[in-house]
Amino acid sequence: MRYRVHYVVEKDRLTAEIEAASPAEAVVKFRHTRPDAEDRNGRRSQVLSISPEPSVDELTSFD
């Protein structure tokens, strides 16, 4: 499942999409794969929220 991770680096609000099995795994993958997970001074970004990314089927379903 794809998750959307909303986070802050310094004063910039950013979003990343991460493929993971759970929200917790998405945070771990985000921390290990994103170059902006740490700012220029070595401080970590702050994760604000994680939400599941709707699948194409969910977006096109009219039931």
Image (spheres, rainbow, N blue to C red):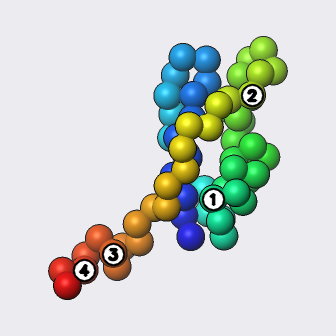
Q: Give the residue at mark 4.
A: 61
- Look at 75% across and 43% down and name the residue there: 31
- Snapshot quadrant of residue 34: top right
Of labels 4 and 2, earlier in sequence is: 2
Q: Give the residue at mark 1.
A: 23
Q: Whole-Å distance between the Cαs marked 3 and 4? A: 5 Å
Q: Whole-Å distance between the Cαs marked 3 and 2? A: 34 Å
| Residue 53 rendering spot, x and y as whole percentages | 45, 61
- Look at 49% across and 61% down and name the residue there: 52
Q: Are marks 1 and 3 in contact (CB under 8 Å)?
A: no
> Badge 2 local density, few (<14 within 10 Å), some, or many (20+)?
some
- Snapshot quadrant of residue 25: bottom right
User: Is residue 12 positioned above or below 48 on the image?
Assistant: above
Q: Closer to the camera, 48 or 30? A: 48
Q: Are marks 3 and 4 in contact (CB under 8 Å)?
A: yes
| Residue 17 rendering spot, x and y as whole percentages | 54, 52
| Residue 30 rendering spot, x and y as whole percentages | 69, 47
Q: Secondary structure at mark 1?
A: helix
Q: Amino acid at mark 4?
A: Ser
Q: Closer to the camera, 37 or 25? A: 25
Q: In the image, which is nearer the foreground, mark 1 or mark 2?
A: 1
Q: Secondary structure at mark 4?
A: loop
Q: Amino acid at mark 1?
A: Pro
Q: Give the residue at mark 2.
A: 44
Of labels 1 and 4, earlier in sequence is: 1
